[in-house]
Image (cartoon, rainbow, N blue to C red):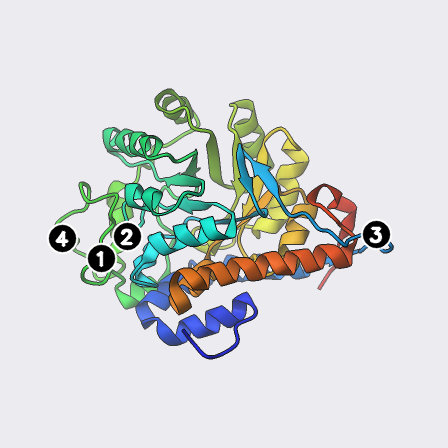
Amino acid sequence: MTDEKLITSDDYQRAARRVLPKMAYDYFSSGADDEVTLKANRKAFKRYELWYRVLVDVSRVDTSITLLGSELSMPVLIAPTAYQKMAHPDGELATARAATRAGTLMVVSTLGTTSLEDVSDAADGPKWFQLYVHKDRGFTKALIEKAEASGYVALVLTVDAPVLGRRLADERNAFALPEGLSMANLLQLAPDEIDTEGSALSAFVAARHDETLTWSDLDWIRSITSLPLILKGIVRSDDAARAAELGVDGLVVSNHGGRQLDGAPASLEALTEVVSEVGDSLAVMVDGGVRSGTDVLKALALGAKAVLVGRPILWGLAVDGESGVVSVLENLRGELIASMKLAGCADLKSISRDLVRKVQR
């Protein structure tokens, strides 16, 4: 743990960069190609002003939310991020415990370095399971069944990764998991050796992910699980409308943290189109570029039910394990409460669309 006083998510990133090996930091921090979308995610929040209300009793502010049946302390969730043991030896176990301590939920990645069963056992809080569909549909079915049997309460299907975006830092670093770490949920699929001079992850995804996945496959997924189904990776309003028509329970408006198609819209900009199309017919969430409580407030004002945060969690994990993640989450909640008070919002229901206006910057 650093002696430096860490107040913001950016503080944690700077501290994490000092303690992480270069290949791990580059993997967590980088985006695809020229990183246009990665940068756009953060810039989008700066294009919205908060037109605050005054003379509102904000002596008590309530940030609690019930989301798809889970009661949470705040509308800030932990996004699925891979390979967390690269950040800290406790990896996903520390993050799960931190989520429970903070009263929120963790979305556990298929590409975790800890098995989904062990993550589930680590803490009592609600957890969602993020799924990539593999060419081996029998293995995919077994993963879903394992998640359901382990007590996960929702399934988050990532739909924007038929192949992996070209992450130049990983290619240059010939990224691969450090010795002693593995994709704990995919040991049956992992090849003995991947022949590549670039990113081993990219080669693995190309070999294993199912590029034939379409809307019609949602029926198959529904047939093998009773869990609520959330689609992660939606940016278009027509795709959102189709998801609603097919009875999906939730959407995460997301460009994969700028790690897939470079030049895709910022998640916050896509959020406005998706919400205008589907309204409250299903739970719409957003990730990408959220770094502060004011960012959370803006996303909620634009119609998100909650936000998912990825990289700041990894920075907290790298700096101080479970306690670091708790601190990042508590900082975000504290910033959200302060922003709500200053904006004249005593609860989440009072955060409305007229609170934000877009400006050109």
Please, what secondary structure does the residue beneath circle 1 have?
Answer: loop
The amino acid type of the residue labelled 2 equals Thr
Tell me, yes or no, whether the two marked residues, 3 and 2, touch with CB atoms within 8 Å.
no
- Secondary structure under the numbered disc 3 in the rendered image: loop
Q: Of circles 2 and 4, which is in front? A: 2
Of label 4 and label 1, which has the lower sequence position? 1
Q: Position of residue 292 (x, y in %)?
A: 60, 61
Q: Is residue 291 visible?
A: no
Q: Residue 128's spot in the image, x, y percent?
A: 42, 39
Q: Which residue is mark 1?
A: 181
Determine contact: label 1, label 2, CB under 8 Å: yes
What amino acid is at disc 1?
Leu
SS for callout 2: loop
Q: CA distance from mark 2 to mark 4?
A: 18 Å
Q: Which residue is under mark 2?
A: 113
- The disc, 2 or 4, on the residue closer to the chain's N-terminal end is 2
- Per the model, the C-alpha gap separating discs 1 and 2 is 6 Å
